[in-house]
Image (cartoon, grey):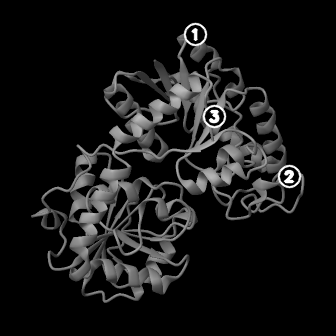
Amino acid sequence: MKVIHLTGKDFYGAGRAAYRLHKGLQHAGVESEMWVGNKRHDDDTVRKVHSGRLKKLKLWCYRNLEKLSVRIKGHWPKEMFSTGGYSFTLANKINRAKPDLVHVHWINRGFMSLNDLAKIEAPLVISMHDMWYFTGGCHYDEECSLYKKSCGNCPVLASSELHDLSHTLLASKQKVYNKKQDMFFVGLSVWMANCAKESFVLKGRKVLNLPNGIDLDLFKPVDRQGVKERLGINEQKNLIIYAAVDALSESRKGYVYLQEALKCLDGERYEVLVIGESHESNEVAGIKTHFLGEINDDSILVEILSAADVSVVPSLQENLSNMIMESLACATPVVAFNIGGNGDMVEHKVNGYLAKKQNVDDLARGIEWCCDKEHNAKLANNAKATVEQKFDINIVTKDYLNFYASVLNNEVDD
């Protein structure tokens, strides 16, 4: 079986998850390739399809034309909003490669045109790493739920028009999807799958729930002895980890709720480590804080996660968080709001703590509870066991192989 994975990057959220599946399939004997726009892995089976100065210039133009087109229509999105246009076309190149199946992950920011989906000859499996495939352009809907109708009055666009850009784009998606019947959608969390099934454009389509997986040979607890010292962290203090792409700037990530929760804690007992942002400040809410910026080396990330007492994910909407999965794999309990796909991984007071949504006091209670020595060791053991039982990439790969076989044999059931 020959499978091609399509995703804009082989790093960050969707790219990291796609790469893990790609390697899992290879380990299982599948001829798997990964086609990306931006590449970091030193791996010949990851193919950078937009290389060269001219393509880099085109990519820059596509990204800026998309932003300009949205603003010309009178919209200034508060969060990420993608049109699916102003992109490279890859369909002909994919068809010439003659894959048995194409697994589509994240295609925006100029990587590939939405219209290409209907032109690809092989069956398509589409992993929904966010809500974009069934909304009018937003990646998360800010809980408006208008994707269940036909979008319009889009809160992400701050629009009061019924037939605004989001309404037009959703109609365009429906036309693309209607042109290709052998197109199957995967919700990585139960929440995402259910949202997709209720959506205007995917109602009646095949939508399944299959999670991402993680390599437990890499993401596993390591000896924490000396790690805090190397990071300049007091060994006697509880270490709180917060990590996200655009950690401080994207409101959906919920950093402000962590800030407020920290005010409720005894600053003498904790230190905070923020991954994903560089910042001059060394203190947040009176608690010593280390801003490490982006970490591209997984072995370093594993060390840091293993040294932490708790990982905090205060997102307001979340699919199947890589950060939660990686933390649990490193035997680090997780505190998160009880939203989206968090409950697929975090079991309340078993391997972490699910706080009431946007409840700062409960978030702080969860941090204190998980860091308490009476609970922490048991939570850590349960965290590791959860990932071993449900998210081991070897187990997840077998589930995807069974799904691929059902797609190719036209035997897909909901």
Secondary structure beneath dot 2 equals loop
Residue 403 badge: none
Residue placed at 47% from the left, 36% from the top? 9
Residue placed at 31% from the left, 77% from the top? 370
Residue 88, given in percent of the width and then of the height, sits at 63, 26
Sequence order check, earlier mark of 2 and 1: 1
Residue placed at 20% from the left, 79% from the top? 237
> Which is more toward the observer, 301 or 25?
25
Residue 309, given in percent of the width and then of the height, sits at 26, 71
Hey, which quadrant is residue 177 in on the image? top right
Q: CA distance from mark 1 to mark 3?
A: 22 Å
> Which is more toward the observer, 29 or 75?
29
Q: CA distance from mark 2 to mark 3?
A: 28 Å
Mark 2 vs mark 1: in front: 1
Return the residue at label 3: 184
Return the residue at label 2: 164
Disc 2 crowd, CA 10 A, few/some/many (<14, 14-19, 20+):
some
Sequence order check, earlier mark of 2 and 3: 2
Return the residue at label 1: 96
Residue placed at 27% from the left, 53% from the top? 301
Disc 3 crowd, CA 10 A, few/some/many (<14, 14-19, 20+):
some
Q: Amino acid at mark 2?
A: Asp
Note whether residue 393 is visible.
Answer: yes
| Residue 26 as seen in the image, left or right of residue 196 | left
Residue 234, given in percent of the width and then of the height, sits at 17, 76
Q: Amino acid at mark 1?
A: Arg
Note whether residue 276 is visible.
Answer: no
